[in-house]
Image (cartoon, rainbow, N blue to C red):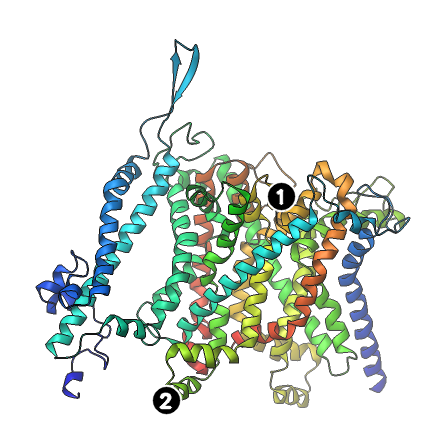
Amino acid sequence: MKIKKIVVNILSHVLLAVLSVIWVLPIFYVILTSFREEGGSYKSYIWPKGFTLDNYKNLFRPTSQIDFVRWFTNTLVIALISTVIAAFFVLCVSYCMSRLRFRMRKPFMNIALILGMFPGFMSMIAVYYILKGLGFLETGMLKQVALIMVYSGGAGLGFYMAKGFFDTIPTSIDEAAYIDGATKWDTFVHVTLPMSKPIITYTLLTTFMGPWVDYIFAKVIMGQDTRYYTIAIGLWTMLEKEYVQYFYTQFYAGCVLISIPIAILFLLTQKCYVEGVTGAVKG
Amino acid sequence: MGAQKKGKVTQSGKPRECSALEVLQRGNAVTKLSFFIFGLGNIIHKQFVRGFTFLALEIAYIYYMISFGADSIANFITLGTHEQGETYNEALGIYEYTVGDNSMLFLLYGVITIAITLALLFFAYISMKSAYCTQLRLERNMRVPTFMDDLRSVKEENLHVAMMSLPIMGILIFTIIPLVFMILIAFTSYDRDHQPPGNLFTWVGFDNFKVMLSQGSKLAATFWPVLGWTLIWAVCATFTCYILGLLLALLINRKDTRIKGFWRFMFVLSVAVPQFVTLLSMRTIFNTNGPVNVLLRHMGFLGSTESIPFFTDPTVAKITIICINIWIGVPFTMLSTTGILQNIPAELYEAAKIDGANAPTIFRKITLPYMLFIMTPSLITSFTGNINNFNVIFLLSGGGPDTMDYYYAGKTDLLVTWLYRLTITQKDYNLGAVIGILVFVILAVLSLLTYRHTGSYKDEGAFQ
């Protein structure tokens, strides 16, 4: 019996080790290639012949088509502003849905459910024309404003997770605040929000990640305006046929550079993330 | 006070849930007139700020309709009659273009005008209700609220108005109006041959749907196989990730597993990397000349020029994509199930062990049912998410390999990526819109069948 247990133990650890190698290997390959000395794209070998930091250094030397630093700041600014707006929208709507009772509550929830079933970018073309009609696609700066509006505008529909979290906070706490003379708004700001750190972090995190990983909307709105690209379209551009020979290794260096801050953010807030996720799923 | 509380009035004097019918039956002439002259009931009773705000809204609307709105409704019905013309200018010896109607803009302005009109009707109702409120208060000898009272109520019983109006505006402008616009396009002939401003398009009823669903047309020959693959993909992607992620979480959470944190970290690492980075890297890794094929060549499994067609053979491409999706999805499931797994009552396991159940039986009879019970809502969400999983397909295979049998679709295209191709590259907007609507119908039917039966929809207050 004891031997069987040891065998099972060893086997499961070996399995875990094999699996983690499979999961880490692609990431390792990305890092490896980002340090590769030889340019060009695909090679007939895997281990680089030489190592260099030039791929990283070159990222900070802007060319006419590739301007990594600028793309990075573009994305950072867009992400920060749209995160603030979107998180505010989400928290407001989910609090109303969870705590306040008014006539449009159920209809609103059903409408949100229905809207969620349409493919997200089906309306992209229409959004594009509305923004064009409003004159937001004239200059690059305005395009960035347009992108912020697109990322944050419809955010109120993504209230389910935060609503689920607010639902788990006992209403008796709110009632105690009312008895002490607090208005509903005071209760929201001074009682509910301080208790909701996991879900706030989760909301901030997910909305912040959006602009870093969105390719389609940014591409449709930005078109050929390379100066105002966000990082995702920028990196994608590097893999296009006319560039891939020159920028293949730089692409990987860029990937590593933007993955590091996002990965750190993610790992730091992973606890909140898990609490936020499990807070919404009820047993 | 007790006597005044009879009828449908709260302590603050606001009619509670009074229906439009009630307002019409019991409202006096001024109240009823407030439907047409906004704010009348408020202005008469010296609620000037509130009343004039309503009135200003109405005046703005009338100005809008006279200057622009009425035309746009008329144009919305015809979608334009004057095509862009070409006339020969004898004096200059060149062709000159005369500006024609732009059907697309007509449609857009029409939708916006209709939205504004609906909003106005809503405000007309609010105006009447507000007048009714004041009327009730006067009938009961209560104080008519001043503007300051209104401001104060925003923090209390009208908090939802303050908190919801901005988000709802955003949803209206960036989700609902565009969606209505696209839905309407499905009923027009807005394809590559009818591109404004050069050409007009017009209403065609259900023709696009007929072509898409009927037998024999090339569109139908594309739609049904793509739909089939979309469903297969969604089922495979959802369940492989879920089951394998659950097993991985169990493996890590086993009592005897050492350095749990380390294992978890190894898998979480791949979640932390932005998805488009992993997807783009995966695309290069499985490229014809990518490292996987190179490795296989070095190990002698393949000749020096041979390669496994990871993304170029239809069947292999589908398998590759599902496998890569497992790589992406499993850590997510592991992460979200870990917490729930730890909540399974230990007594269940002990009882099962006493009854002599082995590990697979325990998994099948206890763990899996328990997890399915709790996670059905999130499973449904991830299923619908997978039907609309644009990123994985678009960034990995781009829908390819392309085939001549299909109408501008590849063998691994999902309905959404096909929609993207049809609208962005082919400019067949009407067909794209039809696909969007059909995706919606499929999801709506699936969700109606399952979602309403889940616990979290039925008793949302269970934990309050």
Element type at marker 2?
A: helix
Whichever of labels 1 and 2 marks the residue nearer the N terminus, that label is 2
- Within 10 angstroms of label 2, few (less than 14), some, or many (20 or more) residues? few
Evaluate if marks 1 and 2 touch, with contact meaning CB atoms under 8 Å apart. no
Q: Position of residue B174 (x, y in %)?
A: 43, 53
Who is closer to the viewer here, B340 or B171? Answer: B171
Q: Is residue B371 above or below residue A90?
A: below
Viewer-nearest residue: B408 or A50: A50
Q: Where B324 sits versus A221, above or below?
A: below
Q: Is residue B427 left or right of residue B139?
A: right
> Regarding mark 1 in the picture, which secondary structure is present there?
helix
| Residue A227's disc number | 1
Which residue is denoted by mark 2 in the rendering?
Answer: A179
Disc 1 and disc 2 on one polypeptide chain: yes
Image-based side of B144 in relation to A187, left or right = left
Say which of A45 and A58 sits in front. A58
Q: Along the line of sight, which residue is nearer the eye, B281 or B149?
A: B149
- Alpha carbon separation for disc pair 1 and 2: 56 Å
Three-letter code for the amino acid on which mark 1 is drawn: Arg
Q: Chain of mark 2?
A: A
Can residue B229 be seen here?
Answer: yes
What is the quadrant of the N terminus of chain B in the image? bottom left
Residue B146 located left or right of residue B28? right
Q: Which percent across, then down, holds residue A280?
A: 52, 74
Residue B286 shows up from this direction: no
User: Where's residue A230, x and y in %?
Assistant: 61, 50
- Report the mark closest to the observer, 1 or 2: 1
Name the residue at 63% across, 44% down.
B398
Where is residue B351 drawn, in percent x and y?
A: 63, 89
Residue at the limit of the structure toward the right, as seen here:
A49
- Is B183 located above or below residue B238 in the figure? above
